[in-house]
Every structure is written in C-alpha cells, then in structure tokens.
Image (cartoon, rainbow, N blue to C red):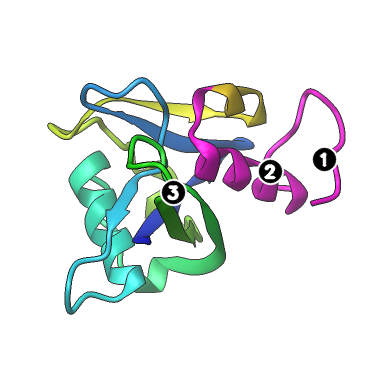
C-alpha cells in the first residue's frame, strides 16, 4: 500500500490539481510520506515542491482518507491518500500556485474533470461535491 498525502486548495468552487511530468492525468498536489514525517508534514512539503505554496500544518485540516487502486503502479497496488483541506486564510487566498520543475502544469478543476483523474482523484472530487465545496454540473452526487 502506498501512503500519500495531498493538498486540497479550493477557490471559486474549483480545486487545484497538477499534471506531473510525463503523465497524462491530473493529480492533487501531494506525494509519499517520507520516513519520520507526519501525513500533514508530507502535504506541506509536497505542496511547496509542486506548486511553490508556502503552508504550515496550522493552515490545513484533515478532510478525508481515500483508498483506491494506485494509478500507474503494479496491478493490485492500493493508494491510501490522506487529504488536507487548506483553510485559505488571508494571504493564502492571494497566493498564486505555480508549476514547479516536478509538474508540467497546474489547473483549477471541477467535478466535470473527473475523466482526467486517476481513481483516487475521482473519489476526491466526489467527496468535495458531497461536502458542498465543488459544483457538479452533471447533477446530484450518487450515494456512495
């Protein structure tokens, strides 16, 4: 099982996602939890590495844990992704994420972009819609 942490930065009912170098799908900014690192520390570190955003653990609230098949890994590999929602107080509202050397681009996406996401991203979008943070232009969220 892969243990990863990811940032949820929501603005104007869209969530920030990145497309990693050489990949064809959108991911949340995030990555593997390193030895000796907490899940929230990994989210802070990865968000900075991938988007240049400077966050602290105090800027984030644990939102959910998503467990899904890992995209681009050996069959049967599962990813356990802890999601941290940015509270976006003050300066964070104005912070402009940028694509780093690790990612080709950043995008602000809606639930309509689920077809461009791996399974964990699709589940995350569904949870964000259910929480009322994203709009789902295709209709109500089915019970899950």
Q: Say whether marks 2 and 1 touch (CB < 8 Å).
A: yes
Q: Is residue 130 magenta?
A: yes
Q: Which mark is residue 126?
A: 2
Q: Where residue 128 appears, x then y in whole percent?
A: 66, 48
Residue at mark 3: 76
Q: Nearer the viewer, mark 3 or mark 2?
A: 3
Residue receiving disc 1: 141
Residues shaded magenta: 116-144
Q: Is residue 12 left or right of residue 35?
A: right
Q: Is residue 89 magenta?
A: no
Q: In the picture, residue 112 is in which quadrant? A: top right
Front-most of residues 35 and 40: 35
Query: Is 76 rendered above or below residue 109?
Result: below
Which residue of the protein is positioned furthest toward the front in this rendering? 75
In this view, 89 is above or below 138: below
Mark 3 vs 2, N-terminal side: 3
Between the residue at mark 3 and the residue at mark 1, the CA separation in whole angstroms equals: 27 Å
Q: Secondary structure at mark 3?
A: loop
Give x and y (percent) for residue 144. Answer: 79, 51
Tell me: 9 left or right of 125: left
């Amino acid at each position: 099982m892969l243990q990863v942490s990811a940032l949820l930065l929501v603005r104007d009912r869209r969530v920030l996602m990145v497309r990693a170098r050489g990949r064809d799908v959108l991911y949340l900014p995030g990555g593997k939890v390193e030895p000796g690192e907490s899940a929230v520390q990994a989210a802070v570190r990865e968000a900075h590495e991938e988007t240049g955003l400077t966050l602290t653990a105090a800027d984030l609230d644990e939102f959910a844990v998503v467990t899904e098949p890992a995209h681009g890994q050996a069959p049967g590999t599962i990813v356990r992704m802890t999601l941290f929602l940015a509270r976006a107080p003050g300066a964070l509202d104005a912070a402009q994420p940028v694509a780093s050397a690790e990612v080709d681009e950043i995008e602000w996406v809606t639930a309509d972009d689920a077809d461009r996401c791996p399974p964990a991203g699709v589940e995350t979008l569904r949870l964000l819609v259910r929480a009322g943070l994203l709009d789902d232009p295709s209709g109500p969220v089915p019970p899950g």
